[in-house]
Amino acid sequence: MTTKAASTASVTMTSALNNALRDAMAEDPSVVVFGEDVGPLGGVFRITDGLQAEFGEERIWDSPLAESGIIGSAIGMAVYGLRPVVEMQFDAFSYPAFEQIVSHLAKMRNRTRGRVTLPIVIRIPCAGDIGGVEHHSDSSEAYWAHTPGLTVVTPSNPADAYSMLREAIRSDDPVIFMEPKSRYWSKQEMTLPITTEPMDTAVVRREGTDVTLIAYGPTVKTALETAELAAEEGLSVEVVDLRSLSPFDDATVGASVRKTSRAAVLHEAAQFGGYGAEVAARVTEREFYHLAAPILRITGFDIPYPSPKLEKYYLPTPERILNALNTWVWEA
Amino acid sequence: MTTKAASTASVTMTSALNNALRDAMAEDPSVVVFGEDVGPLGGVFRITDGLQAEFGEERIWDSPLAESGIIGSAIGMAVYGLRPVVEMQFDAFSYPAFEQIVSHLAKMRNRTRGRVTLPIVIRIPCAGDIGGVEHHSDSSEAYWAHTPGLTVVTPSNPADAYSMLREAIRSDDPVIFMEPKSRYWSKQEMTLPITTEPMDTAVVRREGTDVTLIAYGPTVKTALETAELAAEEGLSVEVVDLRSLSPFDDATVGASVRKTSRAAVLHEAAQFGGYGAEVAARVTEREFYHLAAPILRITGFDIPYPSPKLEKYYLPTPERILNALNTWVWEA
Amino acid sequence: MSLKVETPDAVTLPSAKPLRLIDDSGHAAPAAESGGFVLPEPDALMSLYRRMVIARRWDVQVSALTRQGRLATYPSALGQEASEIGATLAMEETDWLFPTYRDSISVMTRGVAPGEILRAFRGDWHCAYNPHEHRTMPQSTPLATQALHAVGLGTAAKLRKDPIAALTFVGDGATSEGDTHEAFNFAGVWQAPVVFLVQNNQFAISVPISKQTRARALSDRAIGYGIPGYYVDGNDAAAVYAVVSAAMRRARSGGGPTIVECLTYRIEAHTNSDDPTRYRGKDEVDAWKSRDPIERLEKYLVSEEILGQEDRDSIAAEAEELASATRDAMNGEADVDPMELFAHVYGASRTSLSEQRELLQRELSESEAAQ
Amino acid sequence: MSLKVETPDAVTLPSAKPLRLIDDSGHAAPAAESGGFVLPEPDALMSLYRRMVIARRWDVQVSALTRQGRLATYPSALGQEASEIGATLAMEETDWLFPTYRDSISVMTRGVAPGEILRAFRGDWHCAYNPHEHRTMPQSTPLATQALHAVGLGTAAKLRKDPIAALTFVGDGATSEGDTHEAFNFAGVWQAPVVFLVQNNQFAISVPISKQTRARALSDRAIGYGIPGYYVDGNDAAAVYAVVSAAMRRARSGGGPTIVECLTYRIEAHTNSDDPTRYRGKDEVDAWKSRDPIERLEKYLVSEEILGQEDRDSIAAEAEELASATRDAMNGEADVDPMELFAHVYGASRTSLSEQRELLQRELSESEAAQ
Ligand SMILES: Cc1ncc(C[n+]2csc(CCOP(=O)(O)OP(=O)(O)O)c2C)c(N)n1
Ligand SMILES: Cc1ncc(C[n+]2csc(CCOP(=O)(O)OP(=O)(O)O)c2C)c(N)n1
Ligand SMILES: [Mg+2]
Ligand SMILES: [Mg+2]
């Protein structure tokens, strides 16, 4: 089924996700896909492109336009043994399903003492930086990560997009799968199918000795660009790609921070009560005596996501990150 | 209007809240109250007891049973100049209104460049510790506190309940007003009306020199009990009652932490991505070089809120808090 | 899905008055009121009667245990036995039930052990029984949410060509929630094998139905989804059983969903912690007590000489037995294990959760040691 | 509220076919198809025509600007002018409009400056115009949410005894959302002065109406809420204007809410970034193009000798003027101020927000200095 992809030398994240869905559907007949515009249109980002033609309307179909209905019905399907993979068109449009996700999807397994499991994947094209109008650039990860019972992961590159989505679909726990929209068209040389590190582990993307930049999803690229800039200033930056937001890979992050003794966490979402707070708090709890300086958070401001012409002032840039690192006292 | 209360020597939090609503409605005819069971029943916790009889069905009424409808219609009323005070029966039952709260209530002022303001108060009888069955003991504050545009406050005693609710109703910004259910029946000697510290400030409830316990809502009592216990062990604990979760009073908390050089934050909600993460992260950022030890989080576990017979194992107790403080290295 | 959606054949409104097969005085109702349905066979009526008597006795027993403080809370279905049991007996073992907190007697009638049902209300665990064993989901508290689960399960069964149907209870208050609409609509579009049993007991805690809708009846909504709707006398077990049986049969054989509104009355308080004197009068309650669903069927069965004295004695004995068995089950302390708190949150293991587990484990052994 | 809720007087279904006053060929429709409504006066028809021509020209201009990259996105209402303008002209200045992203021509017709409307689509600010100035709320993106705002505002006006009404547009896809149901139901129970203009353009991005509902028509839902519903030919401006005018009048005078479904068609793509060839055929689109709402009214006005050549020329000129004014308004760069990002989040000041503001301020002055 993956010949189309296998012959592709350079794969975009959209194509990697599309192939992951195709291969998962081919491998397991209990995998079904539904949501808004996922059928003939192939999704507004074309992630499900061609899948209805290939698998038919009984495997992938357009639902009525109601997110609570989509998650609620997916729960019922999972009880009966299907493995639904559903799409929320944008972060903000998952909010109508908040009750079904938090009060049922996250809690059903615990409620029933492990007897009813819900192997459901919710795909969310997430975050901003694509010039979207209001409500199309939210970052909702902090809401999900704070909810016990949910697993929350986010790939930062095409290979992870493929491998992690396959793993998420195989998982018996509900997974919030956050796809950074701004990276959809990023390319990577690879042969599909590909298996990268396990979904619940963080990965060091670049080695460094002076500072650890902790990033995920869309900000991994920002962190790597920052590391380049910093190198010119003689600052050696290590970049950790979290990949899994819940659970959190304390071992990998801890090891990096013990080595560098300094860390900063990056995300697009507003800072206050954001995911970066958990990162800073838990790493400080565990590595306090290894830290030479407080863990910094370089994130979006505590404001609603701005309109297209203003988002560039909101998003963390390499310059802003370097400025922040320079606020630390650097003993010679 | 408050004679009933004024003659009361000892006031419960429910009575304080009831009087705050009564006085606000008497003072300002644009204040309206609606929600589920707030009319003849007076609310499942009797916070609106007697108000419909006093003000009539055009000032306080029972709405159809739909939380998104309650918040959505409150928004429209506020656009027209009313000041709705609505009740969500329990944290978990505010989730159907999540989209209206996050995508509209929090963003309307910013969206319209300050031209449309939404002076709405959402009262949420919050948290647990009352032997409630599933969905009746959630702590949702982290979801709201992470949402720019919302103000989030929570009283820990009857006097604050009265004063802060009055202030919340007068505020032109939307306020999430979280009422700790387990403290509803707590009493305090006072004469109503009463005005306590401004809603956006934290208050030191007990002075101490060794450790700062940062608490809010239901855990303030736990913190004070812990301070008593600790005193017997010769440990001097300062207790800060945050009162305002968003905004956060950096000045008051910072001053206390600079004095004690050690701090722990308490809450009922699950720890991961909880409000305590923001507290630990921001206080550490600002006071790192004054900290002798990492800020600890003593909170609920990362599990769904337990059933009544098991909640006592979940909730932070003075013993658990003291154990945690003892994990610190205490240089003589 | 591949389902072709064409305009529904007949667009007809449910009758303005609830249809019934047996009137309040226990006589067969005139055909004009039957909505074209016929009285079930005697043995079906007998088992309806038997299960209602047992359910009533059990419900009364559980309310008593709650007053004695043995249970944290219990929402009684007293007076609603006809719609609860009439609908439940219309289900096959292979069908799935999606109940609410109100529907314990339905769950019990499905075969779930009384003691297991009540562990949730006692506060041992959120749902103690195994939903797969009797194809009965946990009693849902977030209103209307379970209706969507029923649509999803029914749709999955349809995709797998399994001839089963799902039945879900939805309260009158819950019909105001967006999820009820989404469930009705998804079911209509997907032609899901689901029966929505809208149990109109005329109150949502303290709020009367007149403040939930301005429609004549909740079943008037069906037409807006292109699916059949029925307005039924919810205190007539025969009518409920006949209508729901037909709807379930149609659902199992690919005929799609049905909305059945049962007009009944909540005789007890919302739960033990509610005070109904604040929002309704004794007269209203008494008027509905006089329309008791069990007495109604009993009168009919006696006058038709289907029900004899021995039957009544044996059924009463059976009911007593269950009641005392339930008392016993609820006596003595619950055996709850705090360590189970960490056992079911995820299938995959989590280091941070294990750390928290160890913390509690340490606390417990220390406090034991302290004893 | 104190409103006494009694069963609605007449329980009647909307007609199975959309009612109309002018048929496709531009002739007065037979009375049988009029649903009892009569043709508006000539001057009303003339202003409908004038405003539709202007709206069409403007919509085409804005789509062109979007293709040229001057706007980030634009959801066109081409082909929907009859329902957009017919409904909007039925409003008084004191009424309130609750539009969606689709309804820019309605907002423009309310009097909001074209340049101000488009600043949102250019990406300057979420909503640049002042909602209070023309009693027109921001164009809502979260589907169906605005319908509840309309119910709330209408209810507030009713409580204040102000004789005004709210009109909200809801798309066919959006009717599947729970909020649409809650809005219909709250409006019914509270008898709110609201008209729900359900604009059925038969697509929700790529999803056809057949996958949104199994009902004959969306207006069939009205009966489930005990409120009047009308099924209207959404390409007949005269019919839309007549029905909505009556509904708004009734709302203003305490008669409660109305659901008006306008059956029309989205001629353009969902937005410039959509590719309709993936989900619908050219023939279908052409068929609907041939049912153009402006041509229909024009034919009628010409045959009735209400519309003359000079009128057409002056209206065309007026439309051209607006189009070029809009071009000019969109030429040149937007003047946006990054510092405004912090100005409107709260009314009360926040130290932490001021700190973030200073950070950005510093960055900007440094980068200026660097120039
Ligand atoms: C989403 C949600 N909102 C509010 C509640 C609180 N609540 C529990 S029962 C109830 C009334 C429900 O009435 P109805 O649907 O008629 O069912 P009944 O109790 O009469 O069986 C309310 C408001 C809830 N459980 N879920
Ligand atoms: C709650 C929500 N879910 C999803 C979306 C994404 N979305 C934007 S427009 C649209 C289709 C809406 O169709 P319809 O209601 O018929 O309005 P139309 O675009 O045809 O005017 C969708 C799915 C949204 N804006 N809001
Ligand atoms: Mg009820
Ligand atoms: Mg549409």
Image: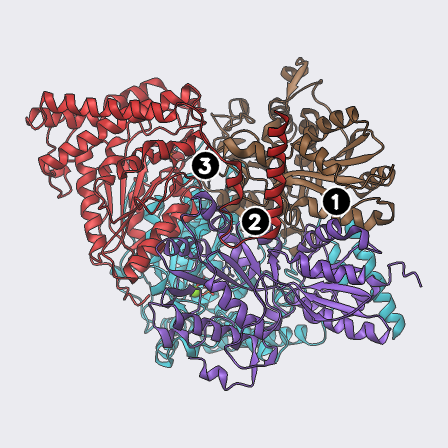
Chain colours: A purple, B brown, C red, D cyan
Label 1 is placed on what type of residue?
Ala
> Which residue is under mark 1?
D348
Residue at figure coordinates x 60%, y 80% from the top left: A188
Residue at figure coordinates x 30%, y 22% from the top left: C324
Location of residue B279 with respect to D65 vertically, above or below: above
Tell me, yes or no, whether dots 1 and 2 are on the same chain: no
* Tag of residue C125: 3
The quarter in which the C terminus of chain C is drawn is top right
- Nearest to the eye among marks 3 and 2: give it: 3
- Nearest to the eye among marks 1 and 3: give it: 3
Q: Measuring from the top left, give residue D83's x and y in whole percent.
A: 43, 63
Label 2 is placed on what type of residue?
Thr
Identify which residue, D227 or A101, lies in the foreground. A101
Label 1 SS: loop
- Nearest to the eye among marks 1 and 2: give it: 2
The quarter in which the N terminus of chain C is drawn is bottom left
> Which residue is under mark 2?
A147
Q: Dots 3 and 2: beta carbons under 8 Å?
A: no
